[in-house]
Amino acid sequence: MHTKMARIVAFLSTLLLAFPAQAVTFWEDDFESQLNAGGSGPWDTSQCVAYLGVPAPAAEGCVQPPAHNNPARTAQAFARSGTHVFERSFQKPAEGKGVMITRSHPGTINVWIRFWYRRSTDYQAAQNGITKFFYLRNTGSGASPVWEQDYFGKFWLAAQFGGSMFCPTSNRFDGACNYYSNTGNNPPFAADTWYCVELHTDLGTIGNADGTIEAWVNGVKTMDHVNVPMMASPTSLVNLGNYVQWGTSGSSYIDDLAVGNTQIGCGAPPSIPSPPANLTVQ
């Protein structure tokens, strides 16, 4: 009887998480107001101290890391819109110690991330293929997916189940499963060029292989995993970790970051003013 009741409660919990009140964009950030300008958000930069040993996090983030660590900060460089971007700069090859700044959002099991991405000419993701990018953080010990980049810059997802489930990519029961680009439509990111990247993670239902993992670059689908295991126990994703760890050299930048529970889209490209009409050359 107790087992049956527990199953019913778990099922109802999944329904409540899977069907939020409405499809919305939770927030957007163009980084013009820095990360923690008022000392209370919108980003939590406290891990600048915990992970990097910075005496006190500045408004723009982790700006004074030791030479062997990876700064995470806003910077006035190559902005797609406005004047500021979020910069990930890698100071030392294959350095594992990094930092994560976080920003909360309403609880959901269905997370869409949209951002514009650019890399420097000398940027190189980690040779071990686990350059961290976004950590989808939960309320406890449940599922907690991490979006990462491989050595060639392709985005992939490490799905941490929050329990044991069968992983189709490793063909065994495990606590996590890696899902990689699988459409064949994933050209390398050219340097000094802005790309619109969309990442989608739907945890599905508890204990079932019904999750979804998708990614697009400039509207071209690069990942398409459906009916995959993602969640072993009840959870709710409530926090986006902007995760800077593992990298070989150079910098990458993001701008116009948005998070929601529905597809946000890239929007129209910046308009180029038309030349005035009826001009004559003297």
Image (spheres, grey):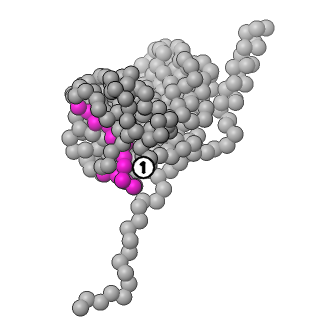
Residue ID at (35%, 33%) = 62
Left or right: where 105 falls relative to 152: right
Q: Position of residue 144 (x, y in %)?
A: 50, 24
Quadrant hosting residue 130:
top left
**Residue 221 in view:** no
Left or right: where 267 falls relative to 8: left
The residue segment tinted magenta is: 78-91
Q: Position of residue 30 (x, y in %)?
A: 44, 49
**Residue 115, magenta (yes or no):** no
Residue ID at (57%, 45%) = 25
Which residue is denoted by mark 1 in the rendering?
32
Per the picture, the main secondary structure of the magenta-coloured stretch is loop
Residue ID at (45%, 22%) = 177
Mark 1 belongs to which amino acid?
A: Glu
**Residue 83, magenta (yes or no):** yes
Eyeballing the image, is 247 above or below 119? above
**Residue 105 in view:** yes
